[in-house]
Image (tube, rainbow, N blue to C red):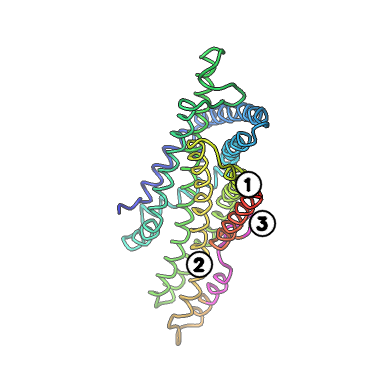
Amino acid sequence: MKTLSVDTSLRLARVLSTLILLWPLAPDAKRSEVIRRRSLTLLSLAHIVVTFPTMILGTLENMESRLDMFIGSTDMIAVGSLILYTGICYIEETRLHGLITEMTSFMKEANDEELAALQFYMKKCSLLHMGTIVVAFSIPVSYILSPLIQDQPLPGRTAYPFSIEPLWIYIMLFISHSVIIIQIQGAICMTITFVVLTWFGAVKFDMVCMYINKATTETEVKKCAERHQESIHFANRLSTSVGRMAFGVATSNLLGVIFGGVVMTYRKFDSIDFFKLMIFMMIVTIHLFLYAWPADYLAQSSQRVAESILNGKWVGKSPRMHSSLLLMMERANNPAIIKVDGVLPPLNLEMFGSGLSTSFSYIATLFAIFDE
């Protein structure tokens, strides 16, 4: 299987996220470029904010049909998530640019062994990343084309395209609807950047372990301590940015399960609506897993530093070397975890599994209630 490399992942994410104005600007960007980006970002947000109340109105108009109401609610969750992701990328722009720059600089200067370690992680998740991109691209196709083959109302309007109102109104609505769906798809691809950065954080700790196993002199141990400190600093900055984005993803996941679960209890609805719902549920679940998996590896890799030191042969070495090793062990006792204090528990596979189990229990309970 062809591996999706770090360069390819970043290049793809950059192209798509630049189109939707989410790729971070450099701190030294020209003033004209900053003004242009800010203006386009505000225009994009204004378009979303104007469309969102229209979707709410369309959902309220369908309250007599609970199925249509909940299907509309899932669309609203996707648009609301887009607003949240855009805000997080804007707030974290400077920090995110610094993290990306550090990773790309590392890749340019890394030796074959370091690149092989990074590629090892990318190979593990390559299939998942490519699958996510494929599913993300299926979103515009299913959501944009469905009004053309269904008697389906657009937000706040009667059925499209059969209506006595002027056709140009529906053309404008169709274009507006399509732009938002493409923005959502681009935002999903942008989050792959956050995921790749998390894998890179795990690689940095693995590099520390590798150099500790090779260290034999005081100078080499000192360099290992410096590398370890740099890895911790990177992980701390990463935790803030990725933690906020993971919180947004977890919120989308929770709301998606709540409303999507209710829709699934209806036995009769269009196959296209069912297909769209399955894509939505799949995206919110895989999206959270994309963050939980590398975050779990990051925590494990940071703790393996202490194990590497413990298993080393340091008997008879200088007291200064022992002091550096003990300091690294003490720092490694605090694993590098991604969380939002007071809001999101430590992000790892255990948290993802617990959330998935709760989601299945919720949906099973809904089926039991509606079957009675």
Q: Residue 300 carries which label?
A: 2
- The relative height of residue 128 versus residue 205 in the rendered view (above or below) is above
Dividing the picture into quarters, in which one does residue 46 lie?
top right
**In the rendering, at what x and y percent does residue 178 appear?**
49, 28
Q: Distance between the residues labelled 2 and 1?
A: 32 Å
Question: At label 1, which amino acid type do we have?
Answer: Ile
CB contact under 8 Å: marks 2 and 1: no
Q: Which mark is residue 341?
A: 3
Pick whichever of labels 1 and 3 is earlier in the sequence.
Answer: 1
Question: At label 3, which amino acid type do we have?
Answer: Asp
Q: Is residue 95 visible?
A: yes
Q: Tell which of 50 and 301 is nearer to you.
A: 50
**In the rendering, at what x and y percent does residue 253 appear?**
58, 48
Question: At label 2, which amino acid type do we have?
Answer: Gln
Q: Nearer the viewer, mark 1 or mark 3?
A: 1
Q: Residue 258 carries which label?
A: 1
Pick whichever of labels 2 and 3 is earlier in the sequence.
Answer: 2
Q: How far apart are marks 2 and 3 (CA)?
A: 20 Å
Q: Residue furthest right?
A: 342
- The relative height of residue 327 versus residue 252 in the rendered view (above or below) is below
Q: Tell which of 333 and 248 is nearer to you.
A: 248
Q: Which residue lies furthest to the bottom in this view?
A: 316
Residue at 41% x, 77% y: name it.
Answer: 217
Q: Is residue 117 left or right of residue 324?
A: left
Q: Is mark 3 on a helix, strand or loop?
A: loop
Q: Magenta part of the protein: which range?
A: 326-345
Q: Residue 152: within the magenta?
A: no
